[in-house]
Image (cartoon, rainbow, N blue to C red):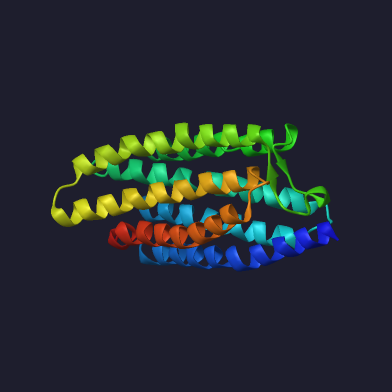
Amino acid sequence: MLLQSALSERIIIVILFQIWPIVYDSFFAYKLLKRAKNRSTATLSCLFSFNALAFFLGFVSIFLANTPFAYLCYIIAFYSLIFAHSFIVIFSWLLVKIDEKTSYKKYFLGILIYGIFSTYVFWVGIFFEGIRYDSGTGWIPVFSWLFLFISYSYIIIFLIVPEIILAVKLINLFEGKLLKRRIKLFIISTFSELAIVLFIVLYNTWIDNNLVFKVIYFLITQPVGTLAAYFIYRSFGKGLE
C-alpha cells in the first residue's frame, strides 16, 4: 500500500511537473533551429533539446515501472540533464570568441570532453549505487550523498566556475546599454538554470525532506526554470539571425 501510494505520488508529480518543460524546451529548440543554422544557434538549441530529452525520458520511465528498462531510462535522462548544461558554457565561449574564427575541431572537442565527463552519472549512479530507482524506492529516484557530492563538485568546477569566468569576459567584451542589459539577463538566467539542477539533485538526495521543502521545491523549480529558459532564448537566441 505504501509503495502504491509512493508510485501514485510519483505519477502525479511527473505529469504535473515534467510535461511542461518538455513543451517549452522543445519549442525554444525548434524556434532557434528554424531561425538560423549556425554554431551559436545549434549550441543553444542543444541545451533545450537535451533538457527536453531528459524530462521526456524521466516521464517515460515512470510508465516502464516494474520493467528492466525503467532504471536505464531514468539514468539516461539524468545524464541528458547534466550534459545539456554544458552547452551553456560552450555557447558562452562562442560568444567570447565571436570576433575570432574558432575551429570546429576545438568546438567539437569541447562537446566531446563534456560528454565524457558527464558519464560520471553512469559510473557513480550504477556501480556505486549513486542512483536508486526501483520498486524498493516506490519508483521514486533516490540519490546517495556520494552522488550529490560528486554532482555538486562537477557542476561547480566544470559548469559554474567556467561560466563565471566567461560571464566576466562577456560583460567586458560587449558595449552599449542594450547589449549590456542582454548580457546581464543571459548571465542571470544561466545561473538560475544551473541552480535548478543543484536543487533537483538535493531534492532527490534529501529523501526525508518535509512537506515545507517539497512545496518550496515545486513552487520554485517550475517558474524559475521556465523564466530562465525563456530569457536565455530571449536574451541571445532572438538576436542570432
From the viewer's perspective, is 233 left or right of 196?
left
Question: Could you say where residue 26 lies in the image, as x and y percent from the top left?
Answer: 51, 64
The answer to whether 41 is drawn above or below residue 165 in the figure is below
- Can I make out residue 173 in this image? yes
Q: Looking at this view, is 120 or 241 the one in front?
A: 120
Q: Looking at this view, is 236 or 163 the one in front?
A: 163
- Can I make out residue 101 in this image? no
From the viewer's perspective, is 90 left or right of 20?
left
Total of numbered circles in the picture? 0
The answer to whether 209 is drawn above or below residue 226 in the figure is above
Name the residue at 63% across, 39% down. 121
Question: Could you say where residue 36 lies in the image, as x and y percent from the top left?
Answer: 36, 62
Question: Could you say where residue 185 lies in the image, as x and y percent from the top left?
Answer: 29, 54
Question: Could you say where residue 171 lies in the image, as x and y percent from the top left?
Answer: 22, 43
From the viewer's perspective, is 222 left or right of 15?
left
Q: Quadrant of residue 123?
A: top right
